[in-house]
Image (cartoon, helix red, strand yellow):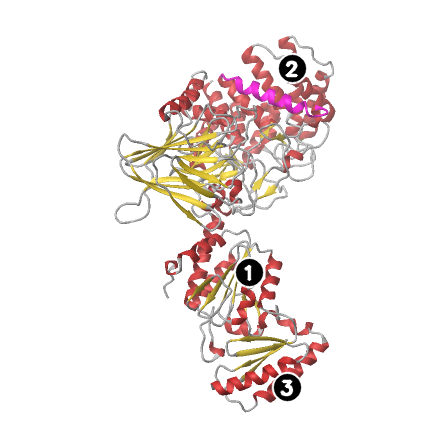
Amino acid sequence: MALTAEALPAELRREIVQLARTPRLLVACDYDGTLAPIVADPTQAKPLPESVHALRSLAALPATTTAVISGRALRDLATLSRLPAEVYLVGSHGSEFDVGFVHELEPEATQLRTELQIGLQDIVRGKDGVTLEAKPASVAVHVRRAEPDVAGEVLETVRTGPAQWDGVQVTEGKEVIELAVVQTDKGNALDTLRHQVGATAAVFLGDDVTDEKAFARLHGPDLGIKIGDGETLAGYRIGDAADVATVLAFLMEERRTWLYGEQAPPIERLTMLSNERTVGLLTPDARLTWMCHPGPDSAAVFADLLGGPGAGHFSIRPHGGGNGTQRSPLPLGQRYVPNTMTVETRWSRLLVTDYLAHGTDSHRTDLIRVISGSTTAEVEFAPRPEFGQVPVRLTAEAGGLRVQGTAEPMVLYSPGVQWEISSDGMHESAHAVLELSEGEPVVLELRCGSDDLSPARPEPERRDEADRYWSDWMKTLSLPEVEHDLVARSALTLRGLCNTDTGGIMAAATTSLPEEIGGVRNWDYRYCWLRDGAMTAQALVTLGSTDEAEAFLDWLHRVLETLPGPERLHPLYTLAGTSLGPEAVIDSLPGYAGSRPVRVGNLADQQVQLDVFGPVVELIAHLAQATGRVRDVDWQLVTAMASAVSQRWFEPDHGIWEERDVPRHHVYSKVMCWVTLDRAVKIAEAYGREADPSWAPLRDQIAQDVVKNGWHPDVQAFTTAYEGSDLDAASLHVGLSGLIDPSDERFQATVTAIEAELRSGSTVYRYRRDDGLPGDEGGFHLCAAWLIESYLLIGRRTEAEELFQQIVDTAGPTGLLSEEYDPIAERSLGNHPQAYSHLGLIRCAQLLSA
């Protein structure tokens, strides 16, 4: 039997596509006439194999429940259908949810059922073609095989007789009447199942009048499908059981694609746009797959990356594929215009140029897309504000499209483009086909935060302004010789993660890109961590740019003004410098390649992380060395960080990796407390500032504490924490920071131990211990960078160069690095692009160039 979804009505297909995207789906159907074609002998009613396969496949999907709700007795239904155990079976119109239900009947109900059996036997005795079906809580009278006059007489006798008894519930179907001793129907059964599994939407398919009770319970995003003729409350109708198999198969394919993101592009192949206010991500074929508004840590307008096309995208591609196919050809390549954040995606006769405009108001974001060439191009514009949770309407006007239904105004300036607007039931999308001529580009301007559809400045002028912003900045940098171009791209990436309005610096451009495909280690990194921000700014200082460091330190000073004391600093804040809201899950998004949950917010902001003070003071030390002075406001930060360490260094904490477990005395955290005081003393000595007399003695005390308690003689390494024997790549900072001399045998032994246990080919894992979360993760590029630096400190340059080259080889085609790398699957993992990874690469290139 050929199953072709195209045979289904177009409106029904759209409804199924929408239903497939619900967070928790319940798929329920009748048996006779639905899964199994109607046959003369009910004992021979077998389900179509295609329907069984589709139900089984649906049941195997996450957050998806399948059920068959039949009038048959549960035992008979199970025997006849032979459906797999994954499919829930509900018999007797919902009175049987398991075989043992009969034992739950009250004595009065059991007695009434016995009396019904006797009474109905008297009525049907001698009536040819009439049969009784005894069930645990009911008795059914079947007249399908009887002559019409006999059937009519029997049914009328039952209706006027036992059907009128107290405590009897009557259900009539096609040539059957059932008398039950419990109050139930298929609608009640559907509601019970919905409640048990927490379904956010349900589909029910049925052919009988008894199924109308289920159709009556459908509401909101639910979908009812009637099989065959007759009046119905269902919204859609199909022909027969073969069509049921088609519906179930189509639903299964759409559900699986949505849940697992089968079209998810490799993370390393995503390319970032930035104007230091907003970031966006492009796929290799010029699909805008991720962008938030009004800020990069706001809700997404385009979340295709985490939810597929239905979550919002803005796509440009060649029209059709040539040779009669409908598949668009893959691009020839994608690149950044050198020394800019402008991205070009090129096909044979099509070029798409993308950039985020500069010079706009702080509340506004303009994404400019220039389409040029000599071919036919296709554009699809599908904004989905608030992660797709707000219905979207599009209105075509002379100047372009107006997006309606959003809190923030939004328009797509596209004069002369003819748009065709369609709806999926909740959202509208716009589609256009463009006939391109050489030398006559089409310019599309997505204006978020504006309702203005009037002409803007000429596009070449805006492009020149954006490109010069980045290229002029690049001219101020001093780049190492080793991997010069990749370091340049890393510098631009770090600068692109900075926020020019606030001074905050994002740890990464995305949320919830997984540390394991299909796993739960999915975190929101679109915020400003004190540690990550300070390390990013420090990397840029070492390249010759100090503005980002000064802006970040000013941001931090404003944060401190809201606190009773520096020791109360949280590990992270929003880009605006405010506390985060509660961590939440967007369960309407299936996640990248099916990696759920999708999270917004980050519980780590409530943790104690005592290492955050060290990177701040180290940044100030590097900034002072670059500028020859220490600003008064920066010295205030130094004293604040030193004060915080003095008050809390001896406490356990959650550490750099933010483990959601009990606090420990992390070696790295203690080392960073030492760094805070060590750099504070040295800054005071070098720039004529007055150091607190307690700092130097406390610094020495912390060093002694680390050496005494952090070294584990049995392991022959500095371990993760004082109370354990497990290893952590962050403990390399015992030597990297200067707390002990790199020539110390204990540091060299630690390098060897971490290499043996945590390095795997081209990457280095953070640790191998059980951190309380299920699943695994990739190796961290930052940890590999630390090991490279450690190799160099102990004279192992060959190993350092080899490992560095392996990191370089994991960068994507446009030079971007994500957080992690899986050396087995040879793919990138984690949020992207990640500041840690790029600053680590810069550091290693500088050291290898020295």
Q: Is residue 391 left or right of residue 699?
A: left
Amino acid type of disc 2?
Answer: Trp
What residue would you read off at disc 3? 118
The magenta-colored residue range is 544-565
The residue wearing badge 2 is 635
Tell me where residue 371 appears, x and y as whole percent.
34, 34
Mark 3 vs mark 1: which is more N-terminal?
3
Up/down of 684 relative to 157, above or below: above
Sequence-wise, the earlier of marks 1 and 2 is 1
Image quadrant holding the N terminus, namely bottom left
Tell me which numbered mark, 2 or 3, is placed earlier along the sequence.
Answer: 3
Left or right position of 492 against 741:
left
- Taking depth in this image into account, of 633 and 57 the one nearest to the observer is 633
Q: Which residue bears the numbered disc 1?
A: 218
Q: Nearer the viewer, residue 611 or 382?
A: 382
Question: Up-down: is 318 above or below 107?
Answer: above
- Alpha carbon distance from label 2 to label 3: 96 Å
Picture quadrant of residue 651? top right
> In what element is the residue under mark 2?
helix
Distance Cα–Cα, label 3 vs label 1: 37 Å
Q: In this picture, is 220 found above or below 399?
A: below
Looking at the rendered structure, the kind of residue marked 3 is Ile
Instruction: Decide whether residue 410 is among the magenta residues.
Output: no
Identify which residue is drawn at 62% across, 23% down: 556
